[in-house]
Image: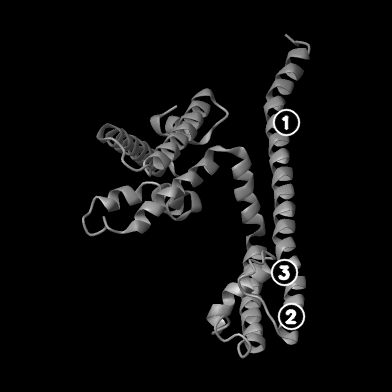
Amino acid sequence: MNLRARVKRLLEDQSTFSGRVFELFSEGLIIVWLVSYAVGTFPELSSGMQRSLALIEIVVVATFTLEYAARLYVADDRLAYFRSGWGLIDLIAIAPFYLSLASEFRSLRVLRLLRLFRILKLARYNGALQRLHRAWSLAKDEFLMFMFIAVLLLFISATGIYHFEHEAQPDKFRSIVDCLWWAVATLSTVGYGDLYPITGGGRFFTFLILMIGLGIVAVPAGLVTSALTQARAEEAERRRNAASAALQPHEHAATHAGRPSHD
């Protein structure tokens, strides 16, 4: 087995001992970084603690950089990996660190926020999260259509409540943009209570929106449940096929061993 095949097996085959060790190491590294990231927000940290946290950041970035380079090296189609979801997550996990080294990017707070995308790398090494990723792939079109409908309903809700309540409460329902906050709280059935209708038409309109909001909450849950069920079924089918493929050589050898010799 050449070097490329060995590296590919280490990175992508978690059924082997080395692959499992790499998986556990990567998961542990992300958890250590998350703890250090949280600790780094404590006020008045000592200089020694700050150096330790900076060292952890460097070790994490260096490890993930080597991993990213290795995955590019073993990828059958490097451009496809670079553009894939996993490729983008691997890149985002390291890019903010290198961008922050440049003085013109150092002041951008969004770079600090982007580091949290490293959490998504756990999905690569966790079977449950992989099933969730597969479920997203299966139900992606339905989710996008649902999101489009939800955004449309939000705008319609904000427009409706504006026309009902603007004259009665001009200080609260000042514009359709301001009414979007009410629409989000109402359609999601959260109902913070900071904005509420006082007119008869506004209350009846709110009742209708609340009824629609129940469906808005239920639809994504149904999509996720259905997609996860299908993802589990596909995983079980792959395991059965892999087990069957592993047994076939042994059965074939046992058949030949049982045949009488004609010599």
Mark 2 in CB contact with mark 3 (< 8 angstroms): no
Q: Is residue 93 visible?
A: yes
Q: Mark 1 or 3, which is nearer the eye?
A: 3
Image quadrant in which the N terminus is located: top left
Which residue is identified by label 2?
203
Q: Earlier in the sequence, mark 1 or mark 3?
A: 3
Disc 3 is placed on an element classified as helix
Query: The disc labelled 1 sits on which kind of residue?
Result: Ser
Quadrant assignment, res 194: bottom right
Which residue is identified by label 1?
244
Which residue is at 64% across, 69% downward?
193
Q: Is residue 77 visible?
A: no
Please name whichever residue, 212 or 185, is drawn nearer the observer in this view of the structure.
185
Which residue is at 73% across, 52% downward?
225
- Determine whether 256 is above or below 97 in the image: above
x, y percent for residue 21 = 49, 26
Please name whichever residue, 14 or 92, is drawn nearer the observer in this view of the structure.
92
x, y percent for residue 30 = 45, 37
Which residue is identified by label 3?
213
Q: CA distance from mark 1 to mark 3?
A: 47 Å
Quadrant assignment, res 212: bottom right
Q: CA distance from mark 2 to mark 3?
A: 15 Å
Please name whichever residue, 60 or 6, is drawn nearer the observer in this view of the structure.
60
x, y percent for residue 59 = 33, 35
Within 10 angstroms of label 3, few (less than 14), some, or many (20 or more) residues? Answer: many
